[in-house]
């Protein structure tokens, strides 16, 4: 996988594009693209088998559930294993998967320093949980672009393995 930073992603240019909404994930193959927008504190987790050109993208809002799971894709800790399961049905083995983690920004700043701790930094917790779950599953992270204070959008091209990332509000260099 390779990440390319672009000023803006024109989602209309991709014919076979599948939009992944917040708290969801999608699986695709070959000449399709997976896209998501508004990755603020949320993380986008990409899983990809470059040989079969099969992959998935999750747009996760929170690290883990505190009770009943209303949407598997909402949580990092449930979305990743669920994507792995779906990808194995499409012929992937866990050893063939590569990962990317994008997003996890610290969007909110509080005047009270206590609220700026890691407990309230959902983006950091999302990224940390993604690293932990992927490590436990033995899936290497090939691309990681997390943190900062700006949201991101991404487009993942399954044919080439390229991930196009754009930052909201500023160019990617200014946002870092």
Image (cartoon, helix red, strand yellow):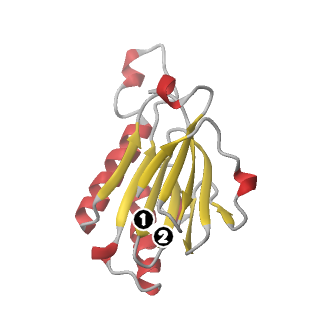
Tags 1 and 2 in contact by the CB under 8 Å rule?
yes
> In the visual, does 157 lie left or right of 99?
right
Quadrant the N terminus occupies = bottom left
- In the displayed structure, would residue 175 be above or below residue 157? above
Q: Residue furthest top?
A: 111
Q: Residue at position x 50%, y 64% from top? A: 160
Q: Secondary structure at mark 1?
A: strand
Reading the image, the residue beneath label 2 is 55
Q: Secondary structure at mark 2?
A: strand
* Viewer-closest of 145 and 53: 53
Give the Cα distance between marks 1 and 2: 5 Å
Quadrant the C terminus occupies = top left
- In the displayed structure, would residue 165 be above or below residue 55? above
Residue 86 at x, y = what percent?
47, 79
> In the visual, does 65 lie left or right of 32?
left
Q: Residue at position x 59%, y 25% from top? A: 170
Residue 56's mark?
none
Residue 47's mark?
1
Residue 12 at x, y = what percent?
75, 54
Crowd rating for badge 2 (residues with CA inside 10 Å; few <14, some 14–19, many 20+): many
Crowd rating for badge 1 (residues with CA inside 10 Å; few <14, some 14–19, many 20+): many
Can residue 132 be seen here? yes
């Amino acid at each position: 996988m390779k990440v390319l930073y672009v000023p803006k992603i024109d989602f209309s240019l991709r014919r076979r594009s599948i939009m992944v909404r917040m708290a969801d994930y999608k699986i695709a193959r070959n000449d399709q693209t997976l896209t998501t927008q508004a990755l603020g504190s949320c993380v986008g987790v990409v899983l990809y088998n470059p040989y079969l050109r099969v992959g998935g993208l999750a747009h996760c809002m929170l690290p883990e559930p505190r009770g009943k799971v209303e949407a598997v894709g909402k949580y990092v800790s449930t979305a990743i294993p669920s994507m792995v399961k779906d990808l194995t049905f499409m012929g992937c083995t866990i050893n063939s998967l590569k990962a990317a983690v994008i997003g996890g920004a610290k969007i909110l700043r509080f005047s009270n320093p206590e609220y700026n701790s890691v407990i309230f930094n959902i983006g950091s917790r999302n990224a940390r949980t993604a690293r932990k779950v992927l490590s436990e599953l033995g899936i290497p992270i090939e691309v990681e672009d997390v943190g900062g204070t700006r949201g991101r959008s991404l487009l993942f091209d399954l044919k080439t393995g390229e991930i196009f990332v754009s930052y909201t509000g500023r160019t990617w260099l200014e946002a870092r």
